[in-house]
Image (cartoon, grey):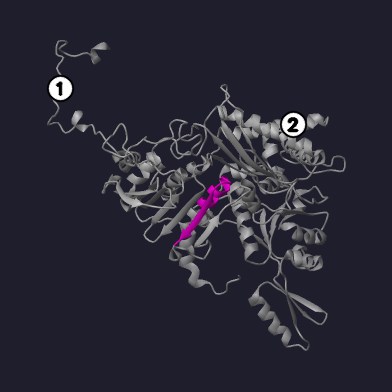
Amino acid sequence: MSDLFSSNDSKNTQLPPSASSDSNSYNANDIEVLEGLEPVRRRPGMYIGGTDEGAYHHMASEILDNSMDEAVGGFANLIQVSLDIGNKLTIRDNGRGIPVDPHPKFKDKSALEVILTTLHAGGKFSNKVYNTAGGLHGVGSSVVNALSSWMEVEIARDKILWKQTYERGNPVTPLIQVGPIQNRRGTQISFIPDTEIFGDIHFSPKQLFKLCRAKAFLFKGVTIRWSCDESLIKNNDIPTQTTLHFPNGLEDSLKEEIDPNNLVCPIWSGDVALPTDTDGQDTGRIEWSIAWLTKGDSSLSSFCNTIPTPLGGTHEQGFRNALLKGIRAWGDQRANKRASIITADDVLGSLAAKLSVFIRDPEFQGQTKEKLSSKETVKLVETALRDRLDHWLAADPSQADTLFLSILEKAEDRLRRKENKDTPRKSATKRLRLPGKLTDCTKENAAITEIFIVEGDSAGGSAKQARNRETQAILPLRGKILNVASASNQKLNNNQELKDLIEALGCGIGSHFDIQKLRYGRVIIMTDADVDGAHIASLLMTFFYQELPELVHQGKIYLAQPPLYRLTQGEKSIYAMDDKDKEKKQNKLSQNRGKVEVSRFKGLGEMPPKDLKETTMDPKHRTLLKVTIPQEDIEFTEERVSNLMGKKSEMRFQFIQEHAGSVEMLDI
């Protein structure tokens, strides 16, 4: 075997020729050495994650983050962001200004030019210049410079203005001393992303404005002035000019996103220094704003040194640990033996929160910094937040008890669902807790029972009064359910409305599906006779088609057909399904004597139970549409569901363009 790796002539130690006529040769001439910023232009994905719209806007974040670092460090309090025609973005701060004196290692270049033309050059590798910073790798400004067709930098230091211009990462002018300047300091960077790299992508004013708002929320001490050329703003959805300053920081942001009537207890906000290190040095600080909701999906937005961390990380782990241990400890203190069953998911399951940490030398996964990986941050955040949580709970025991019991209820509900994953029929001897807001029927024979899935509590209330209690069950859902065709499995598994629906049906899902356990002979989707109702019905049909296809194949899914109008003449009332049906019946009634009164039902919740029963729920009078897929339409159906309900919005847009001309009547 060793002969395979040995030379035929052990004495021949000369290197092979540097070139060969063999087209398959691989030698030193094939090895490229990329210098300066050339690697960035050759492989932009390594530095900003790609060349798509997200990467394009990441360039704006890199420059804005540098100005934010000046503000967080206490050297600036004002940042101006301006978007002009031609994709020109200008970001200016009143900080210290990038140094312009000659760099000691490159004496023929200013520190400014070194920073903008050299990878891994910056002032954030030690704690001498910045205690905490978002830019860490010394590649942000230089990468933006490399990927811009034009960049101009103005530096105001010591009452003197300096300027230098670059194209595709290379200086095209020397550093010019413009002259003395009063009442101005800091750095101004204007740049235009290179179309050779990004093609026909443009800055989105809405996305940039959202970025500026987020940065202003994240640091109370900064004011951001936003301006945008009026011709670039569509639909007037953002201002052309405004000033962004939020003295309450994260709490202001959270209040904008939640319903104040949907709170278990008041919002808890605060900030505190993180524990010092072994040398007694500051390690940073943490700011938070938390709201526990009575209903709705949970959310947690986290940041490190004003950088969004959508993939979470160690600061979120410390956050989870502190909340879980604090809530459990409160339960123990109140002698509640069930406190131990609470998990972090129970605590965070109904929580809307913002978490921001400022730490020294953070470690991220990748240059785009989407996940924090600094190991020590777990303990620092947990210790700091846990202490404040204990004090907050103890300050108002009644409020703390309310919060604890709401979380404990979710934990008990979770265990109950686990024990009764496939809910059996309740019986006279054993009445189990029903999923969601299900009002069950009394008969147990699936062949003669049916469940109506309705939208909202109002429609549910009317349906409960109109139903046959023996054979008809009612399950109200909250508005439009999740579109399962474009949602991840995690979102599907976490969606409470769909969990309730699956549990109510009793037949399981996926590998646990067993149609013999289906608790009802018919599953009837009953929504309002308008556009919103049709949308909800389409979402439910998509759910059954993708997740419970056997119910469709076996003809178990139906659509109720509620009327849209009631026509009354004297004591006689008839119903019309739509405008065409109304016109036809109204003309017929007009042949008789007496005025015809027309009532339009706003929705099932507005329909009197008597009318709902007579027109839509009573098997003797109603019309049901069975949802089926003919064998010859299976491929067509799969394609249509994918195009109209899937993740690719361009397919829906194409469908609308192709069929808009055939629409005769639009209900809006």
> Is the residue marked by circle 2 packed among few (<14), some (14-19), or many (20+) residues within 10 Å?
many
User: Real-space Cα distance between discs 1 and 2?
Assistant: 71 Å
Depth check, mark 1 against mark 2: the one in front is 2
Residue 61 position within the rendered picture, expressed as x and y whole percent measured from the top left:
45, 46
Name the residue tied to disc 1: 16
Task: Choose between 357 and 279: the one closer to the eye.
Answer: 279
Q: Is residue 374 visible?
A: yes
Where 569 sits versus 100, above or below? below
Task: Choose between 98 and 664: the one closer to the eye.
Answer: 98
Q: Quarter of the image for the C terminus: give it.
A: bottom right
Residue 410 position within the rendered picture, expressed as x and y whole percent measured from the top left:
74, 40
Task: Choose between 445 and 457: the one closer to the eye.
Answer: 457
Q: Which residues are magenta?
A: 211-228
Magenta includes 93? no
Name the residue tied to disc 2: 328
Helix, strand or loop at label 1? It is loop
Amino acid carrying label 2: it is Arg
Q: Residue at x 52, y 30 (%)?
A: 374
Amino acid carrying label 1: it is Pro
Q: Mark 1 or 2 closer to N-term? A: 1
Residue 318 position within the rendered picture, expressed as x and y whole percent measured from the top left:
62, 32
Where 41 sits versus 385, above or below? below
